[in-house]
Image: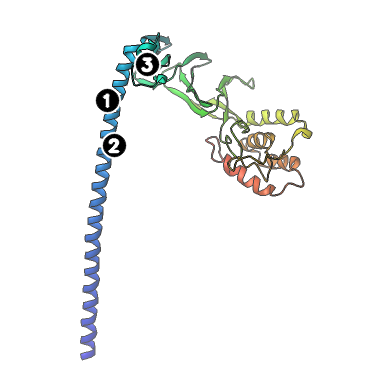
Amino acid sequence: MMNLIRLFIEGILRFMKSLCLIFIYLVILTSCSSEITDLEKKIEDLEKDAAYKQSVIDRLYDDLIAKCTSSREDVTTFGPYTLTENVIYDTDWDCAMDTTIRQGYFEEGVKEAVVTSPNEELYRLGIGLSVEDSREFYQLSGYTGGRHCCALDILLSKEAPYETVFYSSKDGDFPILVGDFDGDGKTEIETKTDIFLYWRASYAGSTVVKVFLEYSQDSFKLDKDLIYAHATEEINRIEYDSVKFLPLSANITDDYTGWEGYFIPREIIKIPGALLLSGREIEAKRFLDYVWPEDLPKRDLYWKEFKEQLARSKYWEG
């Protein structure tokens, strides 16, 4: 009987100990949670303060630039849309040199471009835009500058609702083309995926994969048949003797590794890439096997890594 009482008391004590531990844990957790919340609030307040101060600085810069330059508004109306560009010109460089602002801020040209529809402001950009009539769309194109980034392309609908149908901002200086590229009466976009830029190569040594999109049911979708048709044309034009893995120079950096000490030929990327995007994986692998040198190792590993890289593209459908 005494043993049962002792066991009962020990059980009660273990239960009470567990409750105490749970209580202590909850107190610590609540305290930590409160501290985290306080830190998050401080970060949020600092970010708001930084954003406000940056806006003040921007306005002061604008005021200084305005004192040393002339500006005008160029307004272009196309269909129901309006493009308003704020253009800086006729810089007084003596005035500019007297300021502490770097001369790059006084670069003449379009400072801001605003695109509006009948209902709302669609875009406010810091670059100039060109406008073209492209079949059932208005095409806006621009380039951000720099070495090779970025090309901007926007397609706006001509019919209500007046809205963006296609938007692309990508690395590289290759704008989209709009047309009927297969004669089926439907509008297509010719573009390129930049997913292989800097992949085992420098920018100059990189390759892009051509992509076609077809307009259907109010949106652009991957046109696999057209991608395949152009890939087939590429294959028929290839002189296979020219597809060579050339050795890398000894001073090539680790960022541009090539494959097993060799530059990767462009054909090894753009043709299998297009065939994969068109859903023809068997043909893509067959092409790779055909042009791959017998003495170059790790072909299957290359194929695996190549597909993993392509799968990062927004055009990849698996």
Determine the CA span between mark 3 and mark 2.
Answer: 33 Å
What crowding class fits label 2: few (fewer than 14 Cα within 10 Å), some (14-19), or many (20 or more)? few
Mark number for residue 47? 2
Residue type indicated by callout 1: Val
Q: Quadrant of the N terminus?
A: bottom left
- Nearer to us in this view, 203 or 242: 203
Q: Identify the image quadrant of residue 87.
A: top left
Q: Contact, CB < 8 Å: mark 3 with mark 2?
A: no
Residue type indicated by callout 2: Glu
The residue that mark 3 highlights is 97
> Would you say 29 lies left or right of 75 here?
left
The residue that mark 1 highlights is 56
Where 79 sits versus 56, above or below? Answer: above
Where 3 sits versus 127, above or below? Answer: below
> Would you say 216 lies left or right of 115 here?
right
Residue 163 position in % (x across, y down): 42, 21
Q: Quadrant of the C terminus?
A: top right
Q: Which residue is pictured at 74% across the width and 37% down the height? A: 244
Residue 159 position in % (x across, y down): 44, 17
Circle 3 SS class: helix
* Front tag of 3 and 2: 3
Residue type indicated by callout 3: Met
> Would you say 60 lies left or right of 161 here?
left
What crowding class fits label 1: few (fewer than 14 Cα within 10 Å), some (14-19), or many (20 or more)? few
